[in-house]
Image (cartoon, coloured by chain):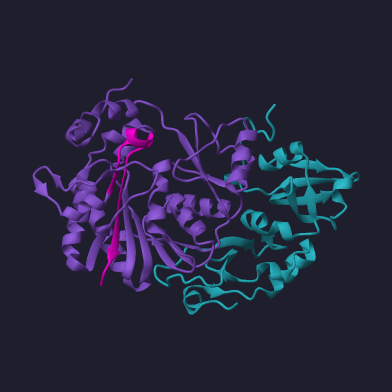
Amino acid sequence: MERLPAAFTRYRAIVDDWEAFVEALRRPLPVCVWTNTLRATPAQVKAALEAEGLRPEPLAWRRDAFRLPPDSQPGNRLAYVLGHYHVQEEVSLLPVPLLDPQPGERILDLCAAPGGKTAQIAVRMQNRGTVVANDRNPLRLRQLSGTIERLGLLNVTTTLHDGADFPLESGPFDRVLVDVPCSCEGNFRKDQKVADAFAGAPELCGQQTALLHRAVTLCRPGGRIVYATCTFAPEENELVVDTVLRRWGTALRLLPARIEGFRGSPGLTEWNGRRLHPSLERTLRVWPHLNDTGGFFVAVLERQA
Amino acid sequence: MNATPELQQAVKIVDPTPYFRYLEERFGIPPATFDGYVLVQPGRKKVYIVTADHRPPARPRPRTIGLPFLRIYLKFPKLSTAAAQQFGHAATRNVIDTDPAQAEAFLTRRDFHARPTQLTRCTGRGYVLVRYQGHTLGVGFLVPEDAGGRVESMLPKSWARDPDSFRLSVE
């Protein structure tokens, strides 16, 4: 097996069980699908997958989503073409329940392509209200449109724009998801090239900070912002949130990012000698060995004023 | 239900009457099927359908709003595959129920032959909705022949399954 990237060794001090972490990274990643409840019931999806010879296991924390063995190809099936389910990694199901969008609200997904999380938002809103799904990459935006069409989403507008410079007059939004471009270390089980990316590169962190700051600016007072990455790098996670928290002072606070039935670690409150806001403990770090998934980070913020 | 002021400001609102009339004539889809939705035209060639309470921004300019509904400026407007799957259940005419081999052909973008008994609800040459096990798969184009007819799959390439690996039943 391929060697673990040297870059990962710097996490030795912050992983609870290093051996289990390394071992999990060497296993292929299970496949995961979630039910488009606008079109089908979880029981129908389960039955359709079973009829295709697959063995879906409901997730411990979400009964409408199913885990499949790593080599499954659930995309090449009738029920997929009919939009009865979407294929998406388990950790990518974490941000939307934490965003908790409500029917009729106005929601912004600032870095939306290829659209799996946009779709989760639209479905949770019962196909009503407003989801604005933005991305700055036209090719990836086209993929997003494909997702909208296959799942039959009638409440999504797509826009092509730099998220960090998203026009202020488009707001305010009740909730904003900002699932930023990142070094993708948490995708290592799917794509081992990702670890070549330099985690925590200053330009990348600057861009992430600008995106989160813009997301907070576009959110109404009292509204919620969810920040997510698929990397382990604290520079792209806690440090970005810490910077934005300091900039907004009492106008912004962290809410607990916890999901019942899903195991995570609290966010870091210190890294490389930098002391962070103590409330960063409320963010969620997902290490691959905790739930046999990819790696992930989520912060839930509430704008106070 | 009327469009929100935000929707009116963001995009051209389309009078749905002629389109709904066409869909009722060709497919027997009652216009009430679309209650609670508004037709809009963000670009040139396509009319989209969106929930009436939608409030998009005017800037940045929306690329798409809701679901593609009809391709216009053709001899006959063509219902999109997405709209066919979403609203096709309401159709009563120009609907073809397929067997597994025909549905497999349709989903891999190949023509298939329809038997006369499958065309009893069809009114002639033109667009038809292709169904399998009660689900609308998409839009076909029916060309009547001496015995039955040829149905061309209008499924977009991006929706098509790979003919080498896609099967509708497990052996």
What span is colored magenta in the figure?
Answer: A284-305
* The hue in which chain B appears in the rendered picture of the protein: cyan
Residue at the image position 25 percent from the left and 30 percent from the top: A17
The question of residue A164 being in magenta is answered with no
Residue at the image position 46 percent from the left and 70 percent from the top: B56
Left or right of B45 on screen, residue A294: left
Quarter-wise, where is residue A134 in the image? Answer: bottom left
Q: Residue furthest top?
A: A1
The foreground one among A139 and A191 is A191
Q: Residue A168: where, in percent of width, then height?
A: 32, 71
Q: Residue A290: where, in percent of width, then height?
A: 33, 35
Q: Residue A93: where, in percent of width, then height?
A: 42, 47
Chain in purple, by letter, is A
Q: Is residue A17 above or below residue A34?
A: above
Q: Is residue A76 above or below residue A161?
A: above
Residue at the image position 30 percent from the left and 62 percent from the top: A215
The quadrant in which the C terminus of chain A is found is bottom left
Left or right of A193 on screen, residue B20: right
The foreground one among A14 and B167 is A14
The quadrant in which the N terminus of chain A is found is top left
Q: Residue furthest front?
A: A260
